[in-house]
Structure formats: structure tokens, C-alpha cells
Image (cartoon, rainbow, N blue to C red):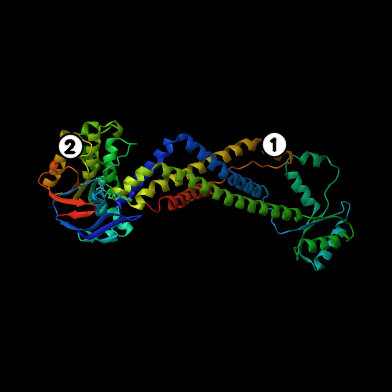
Amino acid sequence: MIVWLRQHRNALALALRRLAGAPVNTLLSLLAIGVALALPAGGQMLYSNARSALPGLSASPQISLFMAVDAKSKDTQDIAERLHRFDGIASAKPVSREVTLARMKAGAGLAEVLEALPQNPFPDAFVVNPRDERPEAMEKLAAELRKLPRVEHVQLDSAWVQRLDALLRLGRTAVLLLALLLGVGLVAITFNSIRLQVLTSRAEIEVSRLLGATDAFIRRPYYWFGALQGLLGGLVAWAMVFGATVWLRGPIFDLASLYRLDFALAPLAASDAGLMLVLAAALGWTGAALSLHETTADN
Amino acid sequence: MIRFDRVSKRYPPGIDALADVSFEAGAGEFLIVGGHSGAGKSTLLKLIAAIERPTGGAVLVNGQNVGALARGAIPFLRRNIGLVFQDQKLLFDRNLFDNVMLPLAIAGFAPREAARRVRAALDKVGLLSREKAMPISLSGGEQQRLAIARAVVGRPGMLLADEPTAHLDSDTARDVAAIFHEFHQVGVTVIVATYDQRLFPGGRQVRLDHGRLAA
Ligand SMILES: Nc1ncnc2c1ncn2[C@@H]1O[C@H](COP(=O)(O)OP(=O)(O)OP(=O)(O)O)[C@@H](O)[C@H]1O
Ligand SMILES: [Mg+2]
């Protein structure tokens, strides 16, 4: 056990020395790996930001129904009852114009404007949860609701949320696909750098075998080399994504405030970064294993 | 300790390096393998360390048929054999100390104990003061002695040396030969392949002639 640990420590030290011993090669490999990993990692960063920028947007779709501004409360009462009897409606929550006014007054910077208005500019409204949430069914329901008297406007709230959701899911798939492809690339990069190393260490490998080295002893430093190269490449990728986040944060914040959104670009989540580093090391190890399988099998 | 039982070795494409060779060497023996160039001396040593496998007969080392050893068992056989190769096989990318350290690193020795042994081995062959030098800066005889230090550093029970005195002037050759006698004296089984048997008086002679044992 102690011997085993010691040999791993020696192999790790040797791998580090080999990385440091060929700084130009190492730098190029790390950059290649870094770029390969930064693309999916950056995609993941943007994806999770997009997700968190849309808080509380439940994917469960709703329909907003607005009365005319000059509708009487009698009219609203009337609509409430009719909605209650509607077949395609699961529930309908009334939102009175007073409540809306109060909420808007509490909100950012609008209080004075609203105070200055002679009367409440908001209409009574209902939030309708349909029974059938498929887009076609909802369009049909909305059309029927539009025919009701004193109803000014009917809006399918979450059609766009659904569309955005689908878009994000597509983005998510693209990120995964990219990660898969570039993961294969990482394995290939490691495969090649290990192959070159084995070729240049032919003499050392041969002599070590003659002096009683096991396959494990011969291969250990290369496994470490692959894993370390992957890990360091992962750190480079993380640094690239972090740099991009910092760089984009200002412009995106400005853009968001134009739309009155309080949104700051968040860096790659620690869990995602950790996962990336572990995967990078594992892929480097895999590349080394494949390369060693090919280059040191029979001598 | 070592037994060759009707051993033959045919290299592709049909070169008979050894044919029907049988002999025995006991533990602690000093065996000199002689013969002309191409007689099969190196092949005989390689069979003992399982660097080559016999194509006929059996090579037994400590009762183990080394020709039939599984690939995974060979390293452990070699760790108990000190090998001095005809072409030395030194590593020129590292200094003397690290060259001699290699067998101990392979066996997983603790660093301090290993360093102590490396220095003792270098001291034994008179190269301790040059431990930081690179092998390329050594003379032929010094390289030969470095190869011996690496072979003995793990304190193996058996020492196999292939032409350890080739290309050396007679004084240096005598110094190198004396080192083998010292190891024999402390109980190590020594087998030396050489053209020049006179350098190793007191050893038992085995002569090869075109791959066959000459009586
Ligand atoms: N790997 C090999 N492939 C083919 N033939 C070989 C191989 N190794 C040795 N031989 C042949 O086997 C014969 C014995 O070779 P070996 O190296 O055992 O001789 P040797 O007695 O050590 O000679 P020397 O004194 O010149 O070192 C020679 O004819 C040689 O050409
Ligand atoms: Mg020879």
C-alpha cells in the first residue's frame, strides 16, 4: 500500500516534470484543450443564465383576459360568472383594477406618474388556467373569450414562454452535442501527445522493462500526464469562460436595464465548473489509456 | 538454481542460436560462458532473464520454468536478477545517480533507503564522486562500471553479465572483473559471458560452439 502510494507520487512528479519540461508543447496542448472545453462550458454558462433570467415563468401556460377600462364592475361580475361556467377553463383568478394599481404604485418609479393621472388607467383582468394546455386548444379558447362582451383584450401569456422554452431546450441539446464532440477532440489531443511521449521515451521504457518494471509502472506516469493535461486544460477553459463573463457582464447589464430588467450575467456555476474539471481529467485519462493500449501493448 | 534442459532457441527466419543445451548452475556458483562471436552466449543469458523464450526444452530458475512464465510474472523474476547488458543500455537523459536509482524506483523503495543504496553501489564501482555527472561524460570503462552499479543496487541473488569487460584495456578489465569476484564472494550467483575467460579465474567454464555446448 505504501509502495503503491509512493509509486503514484513518483509517477505524478514525473508527469509534472514532463509537462514542465516541454513548455511550448504543453502550452499549445493546454490552449487546444482549453478552447475545446470553453465552447461547451460557455454555452452552459449562457444557458443557465438564460434560464435564471426567466424566473417564475412557469411553463404551465395561462391566458390573460383584460376588460375594457370603462367596464363597470357589474360587467366584470358578469364575465366572472360566465368564465366559471366555461368548459375549457380549469380556474380563473380575478385581478381587480384596484389591486393592479396598488401593485404598480409599489413598483419602480411609476408612483408619481400614476398619482398624477386623473383616474385608474388599469382595467379589471382575469388570469385563466385552461384545461387543455396544447397551443391549438388555447388559441381556440382565446378566440371564444375574445367574443365575450366588454372584453377588450385576450392574451396568450405563455405561448412565448413555451417557444422560448423549446428554444432553450434546443440550446441545451446543442451544448451537450458540442461537449460530446469536443470531448472526443480532447481524447484525441491526449492520445496524440501521449503517443509522442511514448515514442520519445522508447529507451527508458525498454530499459525499465528489462529491470523488472510492470506494465502498470510504465503506464502510470502517462495516465497522470493525460489526467493532468486534461485538468489544466479545464482550468484554462474555466479562465476563458470567466474572462468572457466579466467582459460581457457590463454590456449585458446595460442592455438588460434598457428593458428594465435587473439582470447581471452570472459566471459558470461552481458545480458546472467542477464537473467540467473532473470530466476533463477523466477524458485525458481515457485518451492516455487508449494511447497506451496502442503503443505499449507488446514490448 | 539454474537448469537448462535440452534448450534450443531458433530466431526467425531459422537461425539456431542455441541447440540442445543442457547444464546446471548451483546457488552461489561462478559460471563463465565462453565461445566465439555468434556462439549464442547472449542468447543464453537472455533466456535466463526471460528476455527471450526458448523454442525447445525448458529453462528453470529456482525451479520455475521461466520460458512458460505469464507476462505479468516476468517483472518479478527480473527484480531478483542483476543484468549487465552487452550494449549496457544506460539512459543518457539522466545522471549517474538517477540511472542507478531506476531499479529501486521500479521496486518501490523508500527514497532515503534507496538513496543510501545508490550511493553504496556507486561507491562500490568507484563512481560515487561523479553521481551528478551524465553518463555521456564517462569513459567506456566508467560506463561499464555504471552498468554494474545499476545491476547490483537491488542486491539481487543472481548477477548476469554479458561481456562486461569488452573494449576495456587489460588493467581496467581486471578491475571490473574483480568486482564480480567480490559479489561472488558474498554469495551471489554470478554468470558472465565473455571471450576472455582468463580474466575470471576460479569460475566454472561452459563453452558454446555454434549454439552447442562444447565438452
Ligand atoms: N534477435 C535476433 N534475431 C535473429 N537472430 C539473432 C537475434 N539475436 C541473435 N541472433 C543470432 O543468434 C546467434 C547467436 O547470437 P548471440 O547474440 O547469442 O551470440 P553471442 O555469442 O552473444 O555473440 P557475441 O559474442 O558477438 O555477442 C547469432 O547468429 C545471431 O546472429
Ligand atoms: Mg553477445
Going by the numbered disc 1, the residue's amino acid type is Asp
Relative to B110, is B170 on the left or the right?
A: left
- Point out which mark residue B173 bears: 2
Label 2, secondary structure: give it.
Answer: helix
Q: Nearer the viewer, residue A252 or A16?
A: A16
Q: Nearer the viewer, residue A173 or A205?
A: A205
Q: Nearer the viewer, residue B160 or A140?
A: B160
The answer to whether residue A157 is above or below residue A277 is below
Query: Which residue of the protein is positioned furthest toward the left in this rendering?
Result: B202
Quarter residue A21 falls in? top left
**Residue A222 spot, x, y in % from top left:** 41, 46
**Residue B71 spot, x, y in % from top left:** 33, 57
- Point out which mark residue A254 bears: 1
Identify which residue is drawn at 67% across, 52% down: A168
Are the residues flagged by discs 2 and 1 in contact, CB closer than 8 Å? no
Residue B79 showing in the rendered view? no
Going by the numbered disc 2, the residue's amino acid type is Ala
Label 1, secondary structure: give it.
Answer: helix
Residue A189 showing in the rendered view? yes
Q: Nearer the viewer, residue A279 or A137?
A: A279
Q: Chain of mark 1?
A: A
